[in-house]
Amino acid sequence: MTEALTLHSRDARGVHTLTLNAPRSFNVLSEAMMDALHGALDAVAADPGARVVVIAANGRAFCAGHDLKEMKARPDVAYYQALFARCTRLMMAVRRLEVPVIARVHGLATAAGCQLVAQCDLAVAVSDATFGVNGIDVGLFCATPSVALSRNMWPKQAMEMLLTGDFISAEEARARGLVNRVVPAEALDVEVATLVDRIVAKPREALAMGKALFYRQLETGMESAYQLAGQTMACNMAHAVAQEGVQAFIEKRPPNW
């Protein structure tokens, strides 16, 4: 029996871990891999007790991007359009998920693999991880990865990576806004767990409202963003979790979520 391309586990707290599991191909986003990962994300979306998703990977790399051999075997514009539409649906599934998604990054994250890191809400990387959008090295500008990348870092920083194909270190990725934290390899799981613990301690309903609002307001003008944010805060404040949280603050006790 062929082992799953994406391994999926869930702990008792609702923390889902999705592990890319094609180490020999550096976890490339083949059609099968994208479908497997998207299916796992759909399973998380259907779990009302889900709290956090961690996207990890087996082997020496996080993800080496699209499967170029698979792409080269079908030199047809219609096929390529369908392929990149499939990738877009995967990335949007990450964004639309109600719960926070954390990338646990080691080794290489390149092209669509770097895009996946950028698309996640948070990212923790080992200190020797490297990041690049180097499709230009084979004559292919990383257009779809540029969408997520340019929403993580300043445009000129993103454009330099896209135009040159140059890789950046984990520390450079942190400085540019692509990852949140950089740690030695032996501390990676502890750091991810610490971040997960901080999130799980907060009420799911407030996090879900906040994540949806955060991305919606980024795509609109400032006045509209404030209107959306005000509506969200009003709904959040009226919710039982905020009412309990405020009451607990007043009474100087831990909230009973």
Image: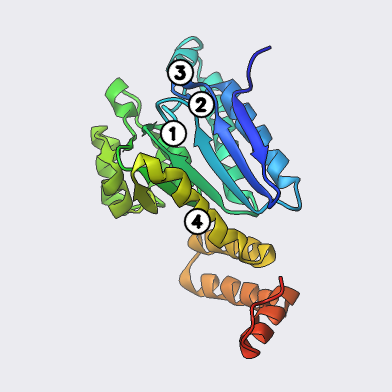
The CA span between labels 4 and 3 is 29 Å
Q: Are marks 2 and 1 in contact (CB under 8 Å)?
A: yes
The CA span between labels 1 and 4 is 22 Å
Dot 3: element: helix
Q: Are marks 2 and 4 in contact (CB under 8 Å)?
A: no
Q: Which mark is residue 25?
A: 3
For the C terminus, the image quarter is bottom right
Point out residue 151 in the picture as x, y percentages from the top left corner: 41, 52
Dot 1: element: helix
Q: Which mark is residue 78?
A: none
The CA span between labels 1 and 3 is 12 Å
Point out residue 152 in the picture as x, y percentages from the top left corner: 39, 52
In the drawing, does residue 240 fall left or right of residue 90? Answer: right
**Residue at which label 1 appears:** 113
**Residue at which label 2 appears:** 29
Give the mark, 4 or 3, whose residue is nearer the N terminus.
3
Q: Residues within 10 Å of mark 4 (few under 14, many from 20)?
A: some
**Residue at which label 4 appears:** 195
In the drawing, does residue 165 fall left or right of residue 13? Answer: left
Point out residue 164 in the picture as x, y percentages from the top left corner: 23, 34
The residue located at (26%, 50%) in the rendering is 156
